[in-house]
Amino acid sequence: MIATVTMNPAVDYTVLLESPLLHNDVNRTSHERITAGGKGVNVSLILQQLEIPTTVYGYLSGTTGTMIAEQLLRTQIPTDWINVPNQMNRINLKIKEDHAVTELNGRGVSVSAAETEQLLNKLRKYGDHDYIVLAGSVPAGAPASHYADVMQALGESGVRFAVDAEGETLRQALAMHPFVVKPNLRELCSLFEDGGTMDTWWDALPYGKKLIEWGAQNALLSLGGEGALLFTDAGRVWHLSAPHGQVKNAVGSGDAMLGGFLAGCAKGKSLTESLRMGIAAGSATAFSEWIANRSQMDNLLRTLPEPTELL
Ligand SMILES: Nc1ncnc2c1ncn2[C@@H]1O[C@H](COP(=O)(O)OP(=O)(O)OP(=O)(O)O)[C@@H](O)[C@H]1O
Ligand SMILES: [Mg+2]
């Protein structure tokens, strides 16, 4: 079983602009779309497609919380939400122009110690054959140690953690030895005081290795259209290029990649085969309007070569 936790689910309001965004002026959209969910939910959508049992966890509040719950009901993915009174899940605005996406993300719901404990109690049933995915930002006002604290509280269970976070939240989670972390290049850079100096993905190699040095068992560094690097605690590094195709919407492709990778691991596939599944899920998602379906992933997977080991 793979449990996904989205501490900060959101309603995403995506708008398309046909002319460049003007500040301090009125802009008109040419297309709008409203979706509800979050990063952990996206991982679960991929897992459901790949027939891996999954349950969605997170905090819901207010009318936006009701929208998120309703959207999940339609997917038929099992959920076990915690309802937080008197607040509202955030609305994230995504402005798409020709080749640029500008995001404006809200702060989200703040949760009490009792509500955190409620979540931990729900997750205590998972053990050494299970995975827990902690994806996205922590609740408003929660300390950067929040993911590390959750991992510590569940530390005895033997469950494997996958973490998709950035900055201090990611750094502190690394020390708890997650099974895998999945930063993109920007999130990797956020860990270094020099901001990471990278012209090509080759320059990311020493930075990526630090993720293992700081405690991760495996680190998947996604590189957008250039594929991904996989670092392991056995000191090995692989690269797999992304296939070429027409990008329709790359938002959520990193979440899809993590879902594909974990599906491989849960099916007992090798790390390199899991990397192929991750790239297939990520790229198929980038080439579709929203999270990819099974046949889109399978079709791409067939075209992917073996990852290249970097020595
Ligand atoms: N332009 C692209 N062409 C082909 N594949 C892509 C492209 N962009 C993303 N992908 C696929 O998706 C994977 C993850 O992409 P990316 O590094 O952009 O994730 P991310 O920044 O974490 O995304 P998000 O957080 O929005 O889910 C890549 O490794 C690749 O397989
Ligand atoms: Mg991401």
Image (cartoon, helix red, strand yellow):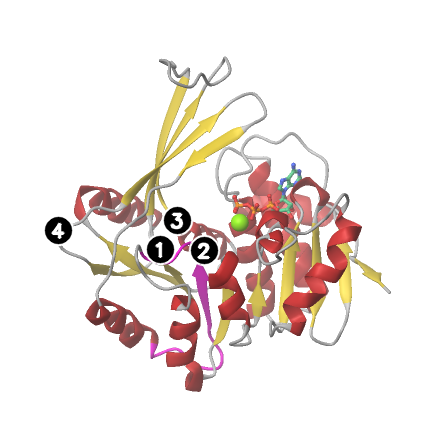
Query: Dot 4 corresponds to which residue?
Result: 86
Query: Dot 2 corresponds to which residue?
Result: 48
Look at the numbered discs 2 and 1 and tell me whether their residues touch, using CB distance below 8 Å: yes
Q: Nearer the viewer, mark 3 or mark 4?
A: 4
Front residue of 19 and 55: 19
Which image quadrant is residue 210 in? bottom right
Which image quadrant is residue 29 in? top left
- Disc 3/disc 1 C-alpha distance (Å): 14 Å
Q: Is mark 2 on a helix, strand or loop?
A: helix
Query: Dot 1 corresponds to which residue?
Result: 77
Which badge, 2 or 1, is on the more N-terminal residue?
2
Look at the numbered discs 3 and 4 and tell me whether their residues touch, using CB distance below 8 Å: no
Q: Is mark 4 on a helix, strand or loop?
A: loop
Does the magenta run of residues contain 241? Answer: no
For this orientation, the residue located farthest to the right is 311
Residue 37's place in the image compared with 146, above or below, is above
